[in-house]
Image (tube, helix red, strand yellow):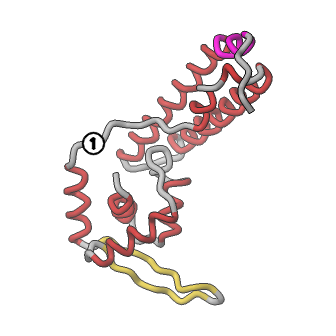
Amino acid sequence: MDTKTLCLGVLTHGDASGYEIKKAFEDGPFGHIQEIGFGSIYPALAQLLKDNLVTVTQYTQEGRPDKKVYSLTATGRLFLLDALDEPTEPDKVRSDFLFRMMFAHLLSPSALEAMIDERMAVLTEAIAGLEQRANSGFAPASETFIDGYALAIYRAMADYIEENRYQLVSASLLPQRAVAE
């Protein structure tokens, strides 16, 4: 999905500043399913404003620039609904961890073990956070579904890593070609 559509999606949850939109993708309900950067949020919001898909209200702040809070318009909601009707793109897995695992044969067993242990700690923390959110009370069905989906994926990743770490680490013990420096 493009950044404009992602911003509109956040605004269905209520008015928000660019910073709050970014936080929705870091710590909020969109954090497990999409990434969005500050560098793309503000140009997208400017275009949405120009296209009358959002409105903006500026609030004066003491010693800081004015805070701009964006609101979804009726036209913006219709635009979002049209975008949601489009066929979905295939999911892509983007992972620094998996990229590094492509080169596991070049790493020492201890470095590889440390990397795997670090990933397991991250997954354990994510699983605990999702379980806590699931037990915290009422959430919209869509967020419950997304959290459950993310929880299933994180559990599957952790299980896979634990079941296959020996194979990966033992392969790193084999002699490898020297890497050009």
Which residue is outermost to the front?
180
Across and down, in percent, residue 99 comes to 58, 32
Give SS at disc 1: loop
Dividing the picture into quarters, in which one does residue 79 lie?
bottom left
Q: Position of residue 152 (x, y in %)?
A: 47, 29
Q: Residue drawn 53% across and 31% down?
A: 154
The residue lying toward the viewer, choosing from 85 and 171, is 171
* Image quadrant where residue 64 sits: bottom right
Quadrant of the image for the C terminus? top right
Q: Eyeballing the image, is 28 above or below 92?
A: below
Q: Is 25 rendered above or below residue 177?
A: below
Q: In the picture provided, is 89 more to the left or to the right than 150?
A: left
Residue 47, how many percent across, how many down?
33, 73
Left or right of residue 16, residue 165 in this image: right
Q: Residue at x 58, y 35 (%)?
A: 127
Asked whether, in this view, residue 100 is left or right of residue 19, the answer is right
Tell me the quarter of the picture where residue 101 sits: top right
The chief SS type of the magenta part is helix
Residue type indicated by callout 1: Thr
Residue 27 lies, with reference to residue 76, above or below; the image says above
Residue located at (30% from left, 41% from top): 89
Residue furthest right in the image: 110
Q: Residue at x 38, y 75 (%)?
A: 46
From the viewer's perspective, is 115 left or right of 49? right
Q: What span is colored magenta in the figure?
A: 167-174
Q: Residue 86: x percent and y percent?
A: 21, 48
Q: Is residue 5 magenta-colored? A: no
Q: Residues within 10 Å of mark 1 (few under 14, many from 20)?
A: few
Height in image: 111 above or below 148? above
Q: Which residue is mark 1?
A: 88
